[in-house]
Amino acid sequence: MNHSATRSTPARTTDTSTGTTPNRPPRRVAVIGGTRYFGRHLVTLLRAAGTEVTLINRGSAPPPPGVDHVRADRDDEDALTAALGDRGFDAVIDQVLYTPLQAEVARRVFAGRTDRYVMTSTMEVYDPATSPLVRTTPGVAVTEDAVDPTNWPVDLDLPWHDAAALARHFDPATAYAEGKRQAEAVLAAGRPPFGWASVRSAHVLGGGAMDFTGRLAHFTGAIAAARPVAVHERPQPTSFVRHEEIAAALAAVAASPAVGAVNAASAEPLDAVGLCELIAGQLGTTARYRPAEGADHAPFSFDRWYPMDTRRAGSLGLSFSPLGSWLPAAVAEAGATLEATTGKDV
């Protein structure tokens, strides 16, 4: 059964804030997830601003010092409600919201507990290969309106909590993108119980060993070892963001009145070959390539167009460093991490 998001009072993807006046950091913030990569940096940023932080997770990783810790499974509504007790927050930043069912639980559990709910989303919502409803125009950066949560269909009957069963409906890339799109749609539906925003993150790079994805290390290691990198015949550019800056963007959006989706990325797109050439230049070597075949291709090699437009972020006062100002350092960090883990010079 297909449930379309009701829209008696649609959440809007624009607001009246200019971004010219700094927003006061919220006094109390809950972060769901937040123990890995830029999530940990987010918690550090909030703490440095004097914010009281409550970290919510299942206890698989300890919180940073000085942080209130709530152990609960965010999928278990009763357990999450009980674990939160009478806690209330000025804002919630949800780092691990992947499905519409999780968004339904969040709406019910945090209604009356917070006035502000910020979801970490992804540029993958714009991937035209994952939905016939997504349209992109080659050469034109994708704006937030390309995927409007207030009009996106939601299917709560899909087996969102069962990866094996969900695989009968979606391939992994589609499951991820569609889960994020439908989660945004649930937050936006009807009369949301809080002001909500989704920060659609570009591909996050930097941080060396903190980057558990290993994608930049994949490129760096292959080029250092003179292994050919599998790229498409005409690789399309994609968007990137520095790990520290996506954390700062989430904190800033949580402190703002912005509603709806916000793209977060350095303005300059880059394709897989451009990334390889930058890495090779830093290593003093030459990148080698081989044709991509089907699913056999390097991370960040795409045969379709969906780099993000960041003008809305700029209108809200968010700024992201030019790609060339930070990507070389991120490559150096990836190389240093490979040297430390493999013992080989990179």
Image (tube, grey):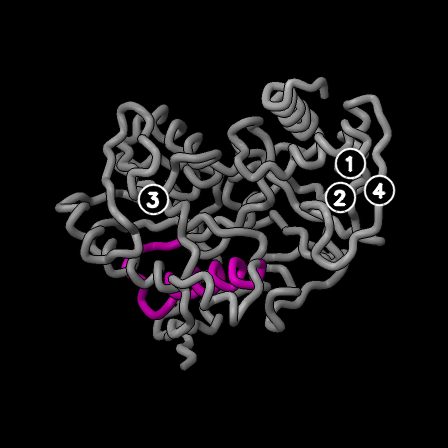
For image coordinates 73% across by 63% down, the residue present is 137
First of labels 3, 4 by sequence position: 3
Above or below, 92 against 62 in this view is: below
In the image, is 69 to the left or to the right of 184?
left
Q: Amino acid at mark 3?
A: Ile
Q: Amino acid at mark 4?
A: Tyr
**Dominant secondary structure (helix, strand or loop) of the stretch shown in magenta:** helix
Magenta includes 63?
no
Q: Which mark is residue 32?
A: 3
First of labels 4, 1 by sequence position: 1
Q: Which mark is residue 289?
A: 4
First of labels 2, 3 by sequence position: 3
Which one is closest to the eye, mark 2 or mark 4? 4
Identify which residue, 187 or 281, lies in the foreground.
281
Q: Which mark is residue 272?
A: 2
Q: Residue 89's spot in the image, x, y percent?
A: 24, 43
For image coordinates 48% across by 49% down, the residue present is 199
- Category of crowding for the residue at label 4, using alpha-carbon neighbours closer than 10 angstroms: few (below 14), some (14–19), many (at least 20): some
- Category of crowding for the residue at label 2, using alpha-carbon neighbours closer than 10 angstroms: few (below 14), some (14–19), many (at least 20): many
Distance CA(mark 2)–CA(mark 4): 10 Å
Above or below, 154 against 279 in this view is: below
- Evaluate if marks 3 and 1 touch, with contact meaning CB atoms under 8 Å apart: no
Identify which residue, 34 or 220, lies in the foreground.
220
Q: Amino acid at mark 1?
A: Cys
Residue 313 visible, this orientation: yes
Q: What are the residue bounds of the magenta stretch?
A: 173-196
Q: Quadrant of the N terminus?
A: bottom left
- Evaluate if marks 2 and 1 touch, with contact meaning CB atoms under 8 Å apart: yes
Give the quadrant of residue 135: bottom right
For image coordinates 78% across by 36% down, the residue present is 276
